[in-house]
Amino acid sequence: MDTKRRIIESALAEFGYEGFQGASIAKIAKQSGIAKSSVYSHFSSKEELYVAVLDGIVSFCRNLMERYEDDTQEFHARERLHHALINIYHTASRQRPMILFWHKCLMSPPEVIEHKVREKTEIINHLFRSYYQSIIESGIEKKEINSPFTSNQLASMFQGLVQSMLLGQVMDKETPADEMLNHLFTYYWNGIHPSFVAWTSTNLVKEL
C-alpha cells in the first residue's frame, strides 16, 4: 500500500472516532508509520485530508453499487432490495470507522469546509437512492411491484429504512441482526402494496 493510501486509511479511523476537531495529524502520521511532516507533503492541510477521506468513501460506495448491480440484475425486485438492505448492513458492520465518519459528516461537518462536505455527502446519498429507484422502476415495469406509490416515494421510503438501520435506531440487542432486518424488509415490502395500504388507511380512519 502506498504512503498516501496509508495516510487516508489512518485518517478515516482518526476522524471517525475523534471527529474533525479532535483528530490529530500526529496520531495519523504515527498510525501510518511516517513522520508528521510527511503527511503535509501529501496533504496541505487537515481540511484537505478530510476531503480526501470523503472522496475515498464516494469511490467505495460507487464501487459497492456497481457490484450490487452486477450481482443481482437478473433477480426479482424483491430479492434485489432485500439483498441491498442485508449487504449494506453487513458492510457497515465491517466498516465501523467509515460509518462513524459518515455520521459525523452528516451531523457536524467541519464549518470551514461544510459546503464541500455537504456536496459530497449528497453525491453518496444520490448514489444509493438512484440504485434503489432503478430497482423499483424496473420492478414496476416487469409487474414485480404493484403499488399506489410512485417510484420516487418508494425509493425515499427504502432509503429511510436503510438510514435508520445504519443509525442503529431500529436494531435491538435481543434479536439477531438478520432476523430483525428480515422483519423490517417484510414490513416494507408488504406495506407498499395496494391491499395493505387500503387496509391501513381504513383502519387509521376508524381509529381517528
Image (tube, grey):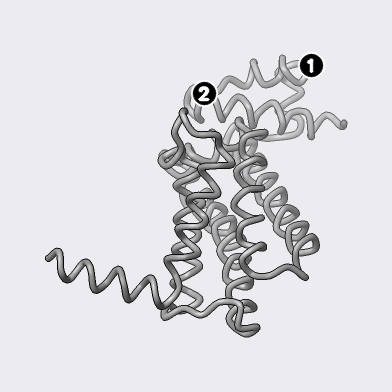
At which x and y percent is residue 52? 67, 42
Q: Between 81 and 64, which is closer to the camera in this rendering?
A: 81
Q: Amino acid at mark 2?
A: Glu
- Mark 1–mark 2 CB contact (< 8 Å): no
The quadrant in which residue 130 appears is bottom right
Q: Looking at the rendered structure, which numbered label has been put on residue 77?
A: none
Spot occupied by residue 188 in the image (x, y as percentages of width and height) = 46, 60
Marks 1/2: CA distance?
19 Å
Task: Pick the quarter of the image with the C terminus.
Answer: bottom left
Q: Nearer the viewer, residue 49 or 105?
A: 105
Q: Residue at x 62, y 35 (%)?
A: 93
According to the image, label 2 marks what residue? 18
Q: Residue at x 61, y 77 (%)?
A: 144
Q: 33 and 133: which one is in front?
A: 133
Give the SS element for disc 2. Answer: helix
At mark 1, the secondary structure is loop
Q: Between residue 198 and residue 93, name the one nearer to us.
A: 198
Screen quadrant of the N terminus: top right
Mark 1 vs mark 2, foreground winner is 2
Of mark 1 and mark 2, the one earlier in the sequence is: 2
Q: Residue 151 location, x and y as percent?
A: 50, 76
Figure label count: 2
